[in-house]
Image (cartoon, rainbow, N blue to C red):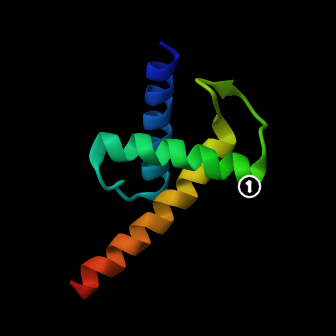
């Protein structure tokens, strides 16, 4: 049950990051989950573990990391779209 909860929280974090940035995460639901997981890793690496925790994620660092990740990925996809 813990893994399913982590998938749900990761998806929500990725979705919120996309909403805050105003750009869609490529890949839909799977992209949101991946952005949430990688964003949580980046956020905890850069900011440490602070704030509320749920589903194995520290929410604030994970959200900040996911926002950074979604922004960078959207810039990469935007530049690839222009060159293609």
Left or right of residue 77, residue 64 in this image: right
Residue visible at 58% across and 23% down in the picture: 55
Nearer to the camera, 23 or 49: 49
Residue 82's spot in the image, x, y percent? 27, 84
Above-or-below relation of 11 to 34: above
Relative image position of residue 52 (x, y in whole percent): 72, 28
Considering the image in quadrants, where does the C terminus appear? bottom left
At which x and y percent is residue 37?
A: 52, 42
The part of the image, by quadrant, that contains residue 12 is top left
Who's the residue at 56% across and 49% down the image? 39
For the image, the number of numbered tags is: 1
Residue at the extreme bottom:
83
Q: Residues within 10 Å of mark 1 (few under 14, many from 20)?
A: few
Instruction: Name the residue tied to disc 1.
Output: 46
Q: Position of residue 13 (x, y in %)?
A: 50, 39
Judging depth in this view, the residue of 11 and 21 nearest the camera is: 11
Point 62% across, 27% down: residue: 56
In the image: residue 30, left or right of residue 71: left
Residue 79 located left or right of residue 51: left
Residue 22: quadrant of the picture: bottom left
Residue at (26, 87) in percent of width and height: 83
Q: Identify the element where label 1 is drawn.
A: helix
């Amino acid at each position: 049950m813990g893994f399913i909860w982590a998938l749900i929280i990761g998806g929500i974090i990725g979705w919120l990051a996309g909403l805050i940035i105003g750009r869609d995460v490529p890949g839909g639901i799977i992209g949101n989950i991946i952005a949430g997981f990688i964003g949580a890793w980046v956020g905890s690496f850069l900011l440490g573990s602070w704030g509320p925790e749920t589903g194995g994620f520290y929410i604030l660092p994970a959200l900040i990391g996911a926002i950074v990740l979604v922004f960078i990925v959207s810039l990469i996809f935007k530049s690839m779209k222009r060159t293609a």
